[in-house]
Amino acid sequence: MTNGWIDIKNTDMMLIMGGNPAENHPCGFKWPIEAKLHRNAKMIVVDPRFTRTAANADLFLQIRAGSDIAFLGGLINYAIAQNRIAHDYLVNYTNASFIVQEGFKLPEDGLYSGFDPSTQIYNKSTWNYEAGGRVSAAPVAAAGDTAKGGGGTSQADAPAPSGGAPPSAKSSQPRTGLGYAAQGPGGAKAGAGGSHPGGQAAAAGAPPSLPPNVAYDPSLQHPRCVFQLLKQQYSRYTPEMVERITGIPKDQFLKAADLFTSVRINGDMKKVSTIIYAVGWTQHTFGTQIIRTAAMLQLLLGNVGRAGGGVNALRGHSNIQGATDLAGVFDILPGYLKMPNPDDGDFATYVKRITPTASNPAEWQSYNYWSNTSKFAVSFLKAMYGDAAKKENDWAFSYLPKIDRNYAWAQIWDDMYAGRIKGLLAFGMNGVQIGPNSRKNIDALKKADWLVVGEIYPDETSEFWRAPGTSADEMKKIQTTVYRLPCAGFAEKDGTFVNSARWLQWKNVAVPPPGDARLDQDILAQIFLKVRELYQKEGGKFPDPILNVRWPYTQPDHPALAEVAREINGQALAEITDPTGQGAPSIKAGQQIPGFAWLKDDGTTLCGNWLYSGSWTEAGNQMARRGTDDPSGLGIYPNWAWSWPANRRVMYNRASCDPSGKPWDATRRQIWWNEGSGKWVGNDVPDFKVDSKPSDHMGPFIMNPEGVGRLFAPLSAFAEGPFPEHYEPIESPITNPLHPAQSNNPVVRKMKSPLDKYGEPAGGFNIVCTTYRLTEHYHYWTKNNPMNVQLVPEPFVEIPVELADDMGLKGGERIKVTSARASYVAKAMVTRRIKPMMIDGKKTYQIGIPIHWGYRGIAEDAGRTSLDSANLLSPTVIDPNAYTPEFKGFLVKLEKA
Amino acid sequence: MPSGTLQIKAISAHSGPIPGQGVQREEDVCKYIDVTTCIGCKACEVACVEWNDMPFQQTTFDNTYQTMPATAWNYWNLIKFNEHQRDDGSLMWLMRKDQCMHCEDPGCLRACPADGAIVQYTNGIVDFQQENCIGCQYCVSGCPFDIPKFNSSTKKVYKCTLCSDRVGQGLEPACIKACPTGCLKFGTKTDMRALADARAQQLREHSGFANAGVYDPPSVGGTHVIYVLHDATKPEQYGGLPANPVIPPTYTIWKRAAKPIGLLLALLAAPVAFFHYVMEGPKEPAP
């Protein structure tokens, strides 16, 4: 979340889409309700089903699964057309004014410029800004600047400013000291003709980079400025087109669009709206781009960085955020440092590749916080390899694995199915069940040599050999050795949970692990120590990374999580002085560092994850704090636990103020500029350079090299385009009405194994199926708990009344759902909460399947339920940016069973 | 079971003074249930089962999210799920937490013939005392909300106690404590009623529910469990909440008319018998 759970109470407007917080985050859902009760906030819920969240909505719209970008793009189009956008925010805090290179092409035909159909990869060199500084029409109007040529008609093309010329909201005079009047020759040239090629075009072979002095037009009228391109891109997402794609009738869409954008009527900045989502957005072959569309909408409306605003991902497990922060995905290291690849010959090359250089108009400033990457990376290597990481050996960079291809979750199972992966350690997950395409995962395990499962219950993965449909003969032939290790449950170990709001909350042990169960960290430590022993005795191809791992724990085979947490926070290895020059006392060797600003790239600090730096300081375990004071009343609770980064509760909070440093809404003051002290001060920790005065025009989005929010995401930011475009799910009931010739995401590839089959309407698969969780169950665990089993005893399939009537089916009767991959049998729940939809003129049904059941559990063992797993049905096909499978919106057919 | 500050106000089928009456003054307690912000998460159901140590039972799928069709002797708190189509075609999914309403004028207590099997405390809680229950099930038919449930093996009747054991110790009921959204609250009747009225007003003025209101039926003297409803004119659509709950007349007559008349007749019978004896003398054995 950019904001946090409690902060939702500060909102005026909620769009809850791609998530079902009332059911999957019931405790957090308190805060949307608080906003309704205490601010009369409105709640719009958009979902394929009328959920328990929808039951609390002011407005509910039923959407076809997988059409979210069309809906959100329609909202962008509506907001621009109605001028319900945040003009000053847009000009000063986003790249709306930046000018994009000539040669960049929007995807009218479904493809951006640079697509190579043979490789299904984009050459992204045209997805870049032009260099050259300011090209605004206004100061050179006398010269007959083309951008001004429209004269009065420009009102229709650009948002009406809510004040004078940017960045000052009040004055029509450009601020002195900002250099707004000064124009580089490049700017003048571009403004006059707009024809020069990108001056920063790199030499052939070198990857293109962002220009240092970006061309920009603060009047937002240059035809190639980001705002105009954005406007052009989403002008195709008309209410009629939204209706064809999403199935939401035009009048209902307009009602929602009017309501959601009503916070920005006439550009008034007081009110704020939030967008709340979860895996209903991520689990698509364009999931990352759905979330980006939401982020763009929020930038357009000036809602990011503000109390009650933001783009808020709800994490579905108690520590999924922590897992992500500590490198839960193959292509990142802890703290979102990029993984090295084989071309990174040495540390310097690696750091240069992953460290962005500032790219902003010369008159503006960009903090470009990732310019500190080398400090984070060296400190990480020092935490990994200790004294073995020295300047002379490139900080032991050669010890780190280099990724030469995709090793994402779906790929691991594909590799195992193909016989390339011979063993698997499965902790904290039920791999067979979480799918997709469970049959393939079950068959993959049959081909493995060994499987280790650390769990609290015997689960489907550790008993994959008795999946339904496995004959006794076949069971005998399975050669996989399974080691089942009873592990401690969450209440049986200490450590932290990191919640959706980025809070690290320390927890204590409630009860000791029962029986033979052991702590996960003990099991991993003991495996590591044995492996190291083998390398010590027998050597090996490359023993150094194993032999040199820093392992400083008091009990090496039982590392205390407190010790691990202290290492993650970071420690000084020599005496270091306050890098900020604020005169804080220096830190002695062996002491905990106070925060990531103290990290160094000379080997005098170690830090497991720079983002968590500050969580366990010399003042103690900050994550265990339980202070309940909230002086601002905004629900910041600065002394409760510890929030990354730097105990900051709302990210990008510089954007909560206008360009002059005054809060957009005085009743929800987060931080502000204090002229007297020359600093940013306030109720939250400023997400900014604290002494950067407003006239410096430093951008509030300090993690972007531009310093501003990206409406246009340049170069390699995303695999399939700088603006999101609606593509159909891989299995879709229609071809894409925007561009039938390019229906799906062009960079997405289907898997090739014999078990990876994909269905089409022509093959009889014409019902859209989506999968989800229920509030009564927690994934695949709680079917082992009689209380939860009592609440919802068995699997079911939710089916519209109309479809059931067509089939002559009654609620409670058994139904067989078939996809191109497998069949699934369960009882039918016939409901009015899913209605038939008209999708591009075709009557289309959607159904839904909760994912919780399988072949291991109380009711399963007693023979009272169907033993199928929902993910037998889902396809293995993944988002090209985040590698998440498409669990939402695939095709099935139905028959009575 | 009840102790501490709980004071008995009424006792079933009990003549004579109520023990401890008037020793302590106490405010009426009340559960507030805002149906319009309930998310049907069933945390209250779980809390109820766990606090009261009730045995699990096997349930079966019944084409609904509702755990079981009705409350049971070992399941006192049940969220009733109802899909409701509005006149404009839009859907509502109504979720109402069903449990004992703790009527000010409790039909169960009126109906009960067993001395001490049902008590009403001065704070409004109506509580069953199973050790005095004779299993006649008159309370089942006396309740306009279908709440008391008979256990055929113990031959006793059970229902929500409003956690009299917790309330007696100054704690809120288990269901209230477990509620994640705050749609359940607990306090004095006066406070909860004011909160409910304010919420209903907010729903009328800001959420477009013109008939929003509070369910606190006067026909049973008001209840110690009150609901905020989107449409208080149609409580039936919330899983059969009666618009005008009434105690069956048999029991009203039993308590209000038949019983006093019976007593009076019994009293009259004594002097009649006396005079008969004086006038006629003792009954002689038949010759």
Image (cartoon, coloured by chain):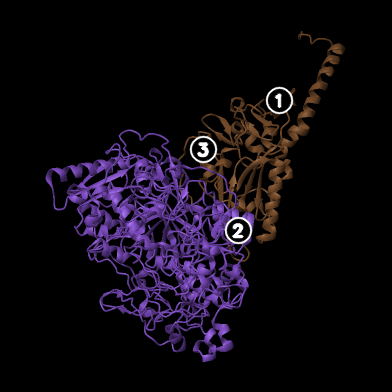
Chain colours: A purple, B brown
Cα–Cα span, label 3 and label 2:
42 Å
Few, some or many residues within 10 Å of mark 3 (<14, 14–19, 20+): some
Counting from the top left corner in percent of width and height, residue A336 is at 36, 58
**Residue found farthest to the left:** A538
Cα–Cα span, label 1 and label 2:
61 Å
Counting from the top left corner in percent of width and height, residue A484 is at 27, 42
Please tell me if label 1 and label 2 are on a single chain: no
Few, some or many residues within 10 Å of mark 2 (<14, 14–19, 20+): many
| Label pair 3/2, CB-CB below 8 angstroms | no
Please tell me if label 3 and label 2 are on a single chain: no
Q: Secondary structure at mark 1?
A: loop
- Which quadrant of the figure has residue A187? bottom left
The chain that hosts pointer 1 is B
Q: How many marks?
A: 3
Q: Which mark lies nearer to you, 1 or 2?
A: 2
Residue A363 visible in the picture: yes
The mark found on residue A668 in the picture is 2
Counting from the top left corner in percent of width and height, residue B140 is at 62, 37
Image height of B23 relative to B126, above or below: above
The residue sitting at 50% across, 76% down in the picture is: A179
Q: Would you name the residue on which mark 3 appears?
A: B49
Kind of residue indicated by mark 1: His
Q: Which mark lies nearer to you, 3 or 1?
A: 3
Few, some or many residues within 10 Å of mark 1 (<14, 14–19, 20+): some
Cα–Cα span, label 3 and label 1:
31 Å
Kind of residue indicated by mark 2: Arg
The mark found on residue B14 in the picture is 1
- Which quadrant of the figure has residue A10? bottom right
In this view of the protein, which residue sits in the foreground, A668 or B30?
A668
Counting from the top left corner in percent of width and height, residue A430 is at 33, 50
Kind of residue indicated by mark 3: Val
